Amino acid sequence: MNSKYRSRRVQVDGTTFDSQAEADRYAELLMLARAGEIADLRTRPRWTLQPAFSGPDGRKVRAITYEADFSYQEDGRLVVEDVKPAWTGRKDGAWRVFRLKAKLLLYTHGIDVRVVER
C-alpha cells in the first residue's frame, strides 16, 4: 500500500514505516542509540493537542493529536523528528496540516519538531 506521498510502506524489525526515507532514518537513529549518542528512541510518539470534548448540543468531538515519526533524548533534551520528502512544495494540504500541528505541539507542550528532509 502507498502512503500519502506515493511512497511504499517498508517494514524493518517488525515496525512498518510510511516510506523508505523513514526506515533509513530509523536505521541511522538505531546506530546512534547503540553508540550511546541518543537514548529512549521511540517510533510514532503521540501527543494530544486538544482533548476530546462535547459541544453544547452534546455532540462529541474527537481529540486532536500529533503523531511524530520519532522521538529520543539527545544530551538530556527531548528531540521530536518528522521525516518529510524534500520535493514537498510546502503548499499541499498535508504540509499545511503538519505545520499547524507542529505549532500547536510547541504551544501546548513546549516541544519543537525537527524536520528531516529526504
Image (cartoon, helix red, strand yellow):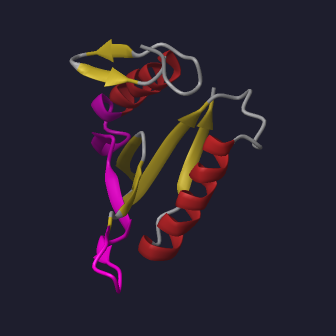
Furthest residue toward bottom: 56
Q: From the viewer's perspective, is 88 left or right of 104?
A: right
Indicate whether 28 appears above or below 100: above
Indicate whether 4 appears above or below 75: above
At which x and y percent is residue 110? 47, 72
Indicate whether 58 appears above or below 69: below
> Toward which corner of the image does residue 43 lie, by quadrant?
top left
> Toward which corner of the image does residue 78 lie, by quadrant?
bottom left
Q: Quadrant of the C terminus?
A: top right
- What residue sits 39% from the left and 21% below the top? 27
How many discs mark residues in the rendered view? 0
Q: Choose between 101 and 113: the one closer to the eye.
A: 101
At which x and y percent is residue 85? 64, 28
- What residue sits 59% from the left and 37% below the top? 116
At which x and y percent is residue 32? 38, 32
Q: Quadrant of the N terminus?
A: top left
Q: From the viewer's perspective, is 84 left or right of 80?
A: right
Q: Choose between 39 and 87: the one closer to the eye.
A: 87
- What residue sits 35% from the left and 80% below the top? 55
- Residue 59 lies in the magenta-colored region: yes
- Magenta span covers which residues? 33-60
Q: Choose between 115 and 56: the one closer to the eye.
A: 56
> Toward which corner of the image does residue 23 lie, by quadrant?
top left
- Residue 50 lies in the magenta-colored region: yes
- What residue sits 35% from the left and 43% below the top? 38
